[in-house]
Image (cartoon, helix red, strand yellow):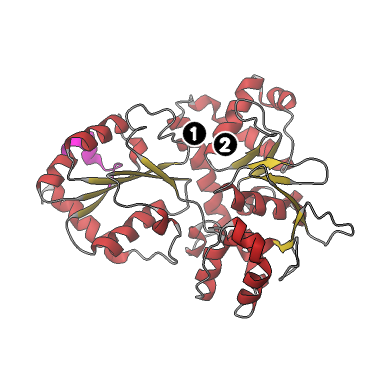
Amino acid sequence: MLPMELFHKTHEYLVEHVKSPVERGLMREIDWSHRLIGIKGSRGVGKTTFLLQYAKDKFGTSRECLYINLNHLCFTDKTLAQFAKEFAEQGGRTLLIDQVFKYPKWSEELRYCYDNIPQLNIVFTGSSVMRLKEDNPYLCDVVHSYNLRGFSFREYLNLMTSVDIPSCTLKELLANHKQIATDIVTKINPFDYFDGYLRHGFYPFFLEKRNFSENLLKTMNMMMEVDILLIKQIEPAYLTKIRKLLYLLVKDAPCAPNVSKLSKEIQTSRATVVNYIKYLSDARLLNVLYDGEESFPKKPTKVYMHNPNLMQVVGEENINAQSLAETFFCNTLFKDHSVNKGEKGVHFVIDGEYKFKIGVSKPKKMDNNIIYAEDNILIGEENVVPLWLFGLLY
């Protein structure tokens, strides 16, 4: 059987058997008319399933679309550009490419395909550590980049209950939170599912019949061993330092990192510690906050685990409800908003405008200039908003 035919057979099998448990919001956000689309995301969030579901929904069994994984040994002998040209000559119109960052000179060859095979649309996936626009002279002016995140609480609710809760913007939520919450609570009780989401709902592989904690730990190690070391071209000998740094941050998260102390602990320079924290953030293991307009390479003012699931797996002995609540809020707001550390009495400043205090019990003294995201209420009033509602933002 010819190699192209083998790829088509594999594609047909994968598309036939793919089943996305819930429609991902990103599927509607992407403008699929673009000729070169990059979909970034951390390990475990379902990038491969996302590609295959798009192929199934848009093309069915048509051979105009083909999914390939660049891990295939075929690409040690044939270039991506040669393969794409051959596919287009046989009537191919959409090429879906997985694991692109493991292929040498992937960006140059994607640019060649864009310039020389105009009838071909290419959608590729890559690690969240990749920088498709900022540091990529071949693609910066032609690629349209999107990020696939883990399940939002809204997506998790829709999966677990078969309801169809739509997403909303932050402004819509703050203006109408009481009505939005009331409409949902008449159908389901979100508290029946919120703890489960915090434990395991962010990563789709909780649906697999495997030990979730062990699976997530393996995924975290792959993020460091492959995504960070390979893409950032770091010597494997430094992996131990990166792993130890993550562990030290996890133990105290959320925390204001003491860079001098951390540099002594892992025996490297302060600048390297700040770089490593940035890499861990790019890999979606951490979320880092800065004061005001500051950003990398300044040291972050506060570090959170990227999502509550990670806290449950690696920080269990120190976990508490307040830290979980803050981590959930921080993660869900990071998608479409700027998130900064607040001043005294305020946890977060969103978009330089909204001041939020996150709590697990209603405060005794209220401030009208602060929005209170409260963990233990189903329906709020005025500037007191249920924490779970922020899971509807995507």
Numbered circle sitting on residue 47: none
Q: Which residues are magenta?
A: 68-82
Between the residue at mark 1 and the residue at mark 2, the CA separation in whole angstroms equals: 8 Å
What residue is shown at x 74% (from left), y 39% (from top)? 255
Within-10-Å neighbours for mark 1: few <14, some 14–19, many 20+: many
Q: Position of residue 16 (x, y in %)?
A: 27, 65
Q: Tell me the amino acid under the disc marked 2.
A: Leu
Outermost residue to the top: 269
- As rendered, which of 197 and 140 lies closer to the eye? 140
What residue is shown at x 45% (from left), y 66% (from top)? 22
In magenta segment, residue 69: yes
In magenta segment, residue 168: no
Q: How many marks?
A: 2
Quick one: SS at disc 2?
Answer: helix
Q: Is residue 167 depicted above or below 300 in this figure?
A: below
Residue 277 seen by the camera: yes
Circle nearer the N terminus (1, 2): 1
Q: Is residue 20 depicted above or below 163 in this figure?
A: above
Q: Quadrant of residue 294?
A: top right
**Residue 114 as seen in the image, left or right of residue 169:** left
Q: State if disc 2 and disc 1 touch (CB < 8 Å).
A: yes
Residue 78 seen by the camera: no
Residue labelled with disc 2: 280
Quick one: SS at disc 1?
Answer: helix
Q: Position of residue 166 (x, y in %)?
A: 51, 67
Numbered circle sitting on residue 228: 1
Outermost residue to the bottom: 186
Q: Tell me the amino acid under the disc marked 1.
A: Ile
